Amino acid sequence: TFMGDFKLSGRELRKKGINRIGNLLVPNKNYCEFEDWVSPLIEKMHDEQDEELEKWAKEYIEYRSSDQDSDPPTKFVWTPSKFIERLGIEINNEESVLYWAAKNQIPVLCPALTDGSVGDMLYFHSINDLGGFVLDIGEDIRRINDLAVQSHATGMIILGGGLVKHHTCNANLMRNGADFSVYVNTGQEFDGSDSGASPDEAISWGKIRITAKPVKVTADATIVFPLIVSQTFAKDVQKWKDDTKDCVCWIDDLDHEGE
């Protein structure tokens, strides 16, 4: 990926096999290399899915023919977050955010995973393998909503707008709102877009609590967020760790301590 210009001619770039993202230039070669890497991985994951489903089917038949005193066997399906975790494992590169997320078992949720190059790869795979590879977004919506509902308190740091912003806010609606919220984006409210929606609008929905003091920073997140981190979490890491070491993350933990 190279630095370019917002005003470069789309027609000329197309002739040269170069795609523009704002002022960044991405050669088609990048996507070809990505396809060479991820396509075999999808095929492998598809095989694993089929093996797990076959195993589940046998266990389920045995379960149905038994006294059914126990819970039924769990059916395995891939989800966007499981898919992303697998990417992080397979990347095995310390320069990758997904690598560290997978290593530390931090879920990365992406309900629009198919909207982009990964979706293209899944499309190509479905043609070659006649479909059958499943990504269950239903399991992931349960996962993100449960994270919100089961949290003692929640805070949102939302960089940019669109689906990411709404999905995070909507999960907090399930718990009557986030306790803390910081938006960093350049969206404007006049056009009625979710990207430009103010924190006050989210309060009306119960996505941010009425007792919260949310902040919106209207700026380029790539510039502002590193400054925010440098003056908060990263300013004195040891002090931050000391201040938060006794914090309770989950409601179950809070109830346990109350006993």
Image (tube, rainbow, N blue to C red):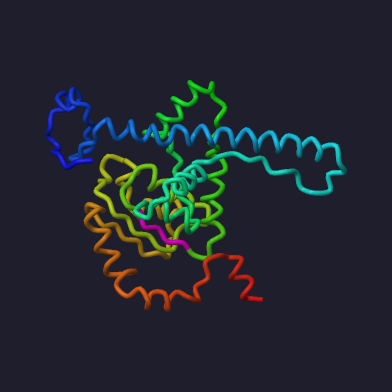
Does 88 appear above or below 5?
A: below
Counting from the top left corner in percent of width and height, residue 14 is at 20, 25
Number of numbered tags placed on the structure image: 0
Q: Is residue 104 magenta?
A: no
> In the depicted view, which residue is nearer to us: 252 or 206?
252
In the image, is 78 to the left or to the right of 2? right
User: Which x, y percent locates residue 32?
Assistant: 33, 31
Vertical comparison of 141 with 131: above or below: below
Q: Which of these two is toward me, 40 or 128?
A: 40
Q: Farthest residue toward the right? A: 67
| Residue name at image x 12 percent, y 34 percent | 7
**Picture quadrant of residue 1:** top left
Q: Which residues are magenta?
A: 154-158
Q: Whole-percent x and y of residue 179? A: 44, 63
Residue 145 location (% of width, % of height): 53, 51
Residue at 63%, 76% (x, y): give it. 258
Residue 226 falls in which quadrant of the image? bottom left
Figure quadrant of residue 132: top right
Relative vertical location of residue 237 with respect to residue 40 in this rendering, above or below: below
Q: Main secondary structure of the magenta part?
A: strand
Which of the image's four quarters has the C terminus? bottom right
Residue for point 29% across, 46% down: 196
Which residue is located at x 46 percent, y 41 percent?
111
